[in-house]
Image: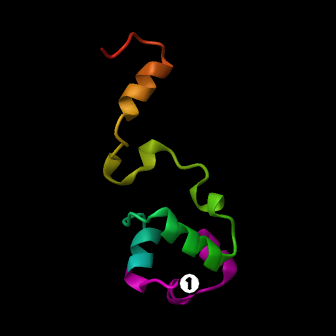
């Protein structure tokens, strides 16, 4: 939302520019949607920013509903140097 406001455009205008449904865009902006990389690229292109700007700094803890990617706990365990999972 910060980048959209900085660009001075409404959610409706940005959704139209990104060629997407307003409701879907609003879900993403509120953190309720689950956009694909392609959708994020559409939004970044509409905002005229690099895609990395939209995802830089995100951490697994910020995932919707606290859902971690498959294997997240195993990777963290391996980083700590614990013994093998098997």
The residue located at (42%, 12%) in the rendering is: 82
Instruction: Give percent across and percent down for residue 68.
Output: 36, 42
Q: Residue furthest front?
A: 86
Residue at mark 1: 14
Is the stretch drawn in magenta largely helix, strand or loop? helix
Residue 38 is covered by the magenta coloring? no
Q: Quadrant of the N terminus?
A: bottom right
Query: From what the image shows, is residue 36 above or below residue 9?
Result: above
Query: From what the image shows, is residue 5 above or below residue 17?
Result: above
Near-viewer residue (9 or 56): 56
Near-viewer residue (49 or 84): 84
The residue located at (33%, 46%) in the rendering is: 67
Query: From what the image shows, is residue 38 above or below residue 81?
Result: below
Badge 1: residue crowd in 10 Å (few <14, some 14–19, many ≥20) = many
The residue located at (55%, 82%) in the rendering is: 18
Taking the image as shown, residue 5 lies to the left or right of residue 20, namely right
Q: Specify the quadrant of the image occupied by residue 84.
A: top left
Q: How is the image coloured?
A: rainbow
The residue located at (43%, 28%) in the rendering is: 75
Q: Quadrant of the C terminus?
A: top left
Magenta part of the protein: which range?
1-23
Label 1, secondary structure: give it.
Answer: helix
Instruction: Give percent across and percent down for residue 12.
Output: 50, 89
Instruction: Give percent across and percent down for residue 37.
Output: 50, 63
Q: Residue furthest top?
A: 83
Taking the image as shown, residue 40 lies to the left or right of residue 84, namely right
Taking the image as shown, residue 77 lies to the left or right of residue 19, namely left
Count of marks overlaid on the render: 1
Q: Specify the quadrant of the image occupied by residue 8.
A: bottom right
Q: Specify the quadrant of the image occupied by residue 44.
A: bottom right
Taking the image as shown, residue 84 lies to the left or right of residue 11, namely left
């Amino acid at each position: 939302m910060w980048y959209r406001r900085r660009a001075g455009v409404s959610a409706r205008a940005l959704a139209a520019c990104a060629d997407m449904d307003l409701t879907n865009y609003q879900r993403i902006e509120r953190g309720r949607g689950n956009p694909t990389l392609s959708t994020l690229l559409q939004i970044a292109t509409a905002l005229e920013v690099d895609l990395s700007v939209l995802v830089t700094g995100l951490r697994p803890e910020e995932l919707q509903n606290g859902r971690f990617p498959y294997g997240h706990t195993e990777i963290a365990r391996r980083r700590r140097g614990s013994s093998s999972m098997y």
